[in-house]
Image (cartoon, rainbow, N blue to C red):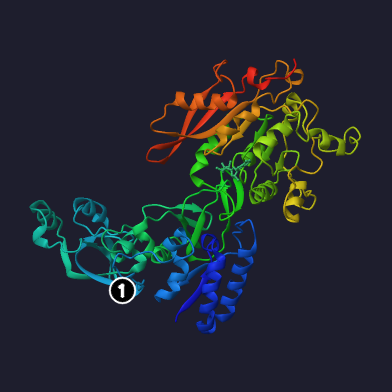
Amino acid sequence: MRLLVHQIHPAIVASAGRLSRKLSVLTNAAGNSRPALRATNEAFAARSRSEPFRINHQTYHTLIFGANSMECVAVVTATANAAASAAPSTSGHDVPTLDRDSFKQILNVIAIRVPNRKCADVMKAFRGFTLDRPRLRCIVQDGDRSETKLLLLEENIKLEDLPPELHGRLEAEGLTVAATDHPVVLDYGMLSADAVLKRLLPSGVDAPSSFETIGHIAHLNLREEQLPFRFLIGKVLLDKNPHLRTVVNKVGSIENEFRVFQMEVIAGESRLETEVTQHGARFRLDFSQVYWNSRLESEHLRLVSSFQYGEVLVDMMAGIGPFAIPAAQKGLTVYANDLNPRSAHYLALNARLNRLGSSCLKVFNTDGRAFLRLLCDCPGSTAQELRAKLPPPPPPGGGDGGDGGDISAAATNGGCTAVGGNPAKRQKTRAAEAAEAGPLPAVPDGFAPPVGGLLFHHVVMNLPASAIEFLDAFSGAFDPAYWGCRPLPLVHCYTFKRSAETEADIVAKAERYLGGPMDSDGSCSVHTVRDVAPNKLMICLSFRVPREVAFKGRRT
Ligand SMILES: C[S@@+](CC[C@H](N)C(=O)[O-])C[C@H]1O[C@@H](n2cnc3c(N)ncnc32)[C@H](O)[C@@H]1O
């Protein structure tokens, strides 16, 4: 019985108890896999006792079973997703092994001897007949002759296939055929991933056409019929993309509130913490723990470009900071929040990596609605309690300028400054300390909004599946005495639009959650971000919070 303990996928652990019992049976027959298997069993047993079930992406591993049917059954009983990834059907095809040497091939081609100075002209004249393979040149060295080169023709082209004008050219230029069987060696290293996979995969199974790259990780979304061949596909992609170290495949769909999906490492290292650079900002993340989508890069840039130096940004669902970090780098003061503790952790870490101090970027780890109402000092929020805990104000000239404050003050301060200068003197930021110390508090230490609420210019809400439902948080959130006739913030709310819906439908839906009409000052605009599925677009709805919504139920 062959049993290979590799990784346990979160999906499998969902029915850990059942699987654990099966595994105890397997342990007895597992030979030298025993210690690893025992540890695995213990992890399963511990998980199955913990109620409610919580996904901890770091500790799970996927089990890959040999051909033995009994072992596969253990996985199949876990969950439908796990079953699909653990023992998918090959539709009767054997999964080929990757024998790199088998790709070695010698082509015998015609070689025409051409004086060096005529090479460019002759190559141009013979276009369409010359050797045309990736990573191979059609003009090569002519043995040890220094005055001539060899022009190689494509495989299977014979002299008699050449049109009369090319024969004329050969004669006129005095060109000779150096060999009719010049050997050209083709090997695995010269082939593209697509060419290799085309040769290995059975008909009806295409090579993946693209993948997302996140640092050293390639993220695939394989189709059902590709799943049996996933390890092979992963191996070839690693071979052909030297910057990659890990290949993962998405398992199932994103269903959890943190927008994190289950994934299986199909090739390379199991290391899922990586680093990405976007427009000069560095982002560290664990791809299995937090949301990240490299395809949103231009949208992050578009929105941040619309912000002005010195403004104040509130990012309600900030993830690891692709809006928040560049905005702070641009000189905005940023209040960034995410409900996922791991996102908040990486957000704080990324602030530090990009040398942004806590006066530039404050990290919160709470529900977006509660976060907004806290910043606005809404009745019922914890703002007052937080203020009561604040230490006495620093002497004039000291401190980091304090929290909250005035829109105009932020503007004249020029927002925030990066922590820079002499590295020896560089201060550790509070965010950095928190990032090192483990889970972040829901509200950063020492923060309390000013009486009447913080003044801010923009709110970003990027949780397209449900952000629109959070618009109710704006209703009556603003203190008219404090905001007076200042412009209310611009909201940038991401949502999905299906092909059956119009933009007007989406605006009407947003207004229902907001509790009032949104376009009284003509600020409302709809921007299409990207196609996410054949009949589904991601869009960004931008509008200024309407006064009648902002001050609803508040005394003027
Ligand atoms: C689609 S991601 C966007 C993250 C980031 N803004 C970006 O562009 O990459 C949505 C984020 O919302 C967070 N989230 C989900 N529910 C939330 C809530 N109730 N309050 C705050 N954040 C939430 C998730 O953890 C996730 O990081």
Q: Is residue 456 left or right of residue 226?
A: right
Q: Does residue 415 lie above or below 227 as drawn?
A: above
Q: Is residue 48 left or right of residue 228?
A: right
Query: Residue drawn 58% across and 72% down?
Result: 40
Q: Which residue is mark 1?
A: 102
Q: Position of residue 495 (x, y in %)?
A: 51, 34
The answer to whether mark 1 is within 8 Å of ligand 1 is: no
Image quadrant assignment for residue 448: top right
Q: Secondary structure at mark 1?
A: helix
Query: Residue drawn 52% across and 58% down?
Result: 216
Amino acid of disc 1: Ser
Residue 228 vs residue 266, the one in the foreground: 228
Q: Position of residue 196 (x, y in %)?
A: 33, 64
Residue 343 vs residue 514, the one in the foreground: 514
Q: Quadrant of the N terminus?
A: bottom left
Label 1 packing within 10 angstroms: few (<14), some (14-19), many (20+): few
Image quadrant assignment for residue 132: bottom left
Q: Position of residue 492 (x, y in %)?
A: 57, 30
Q: Position of residue 342 (x, y in %)?
A: 65, 51
State ligand 1's quadrant. top right
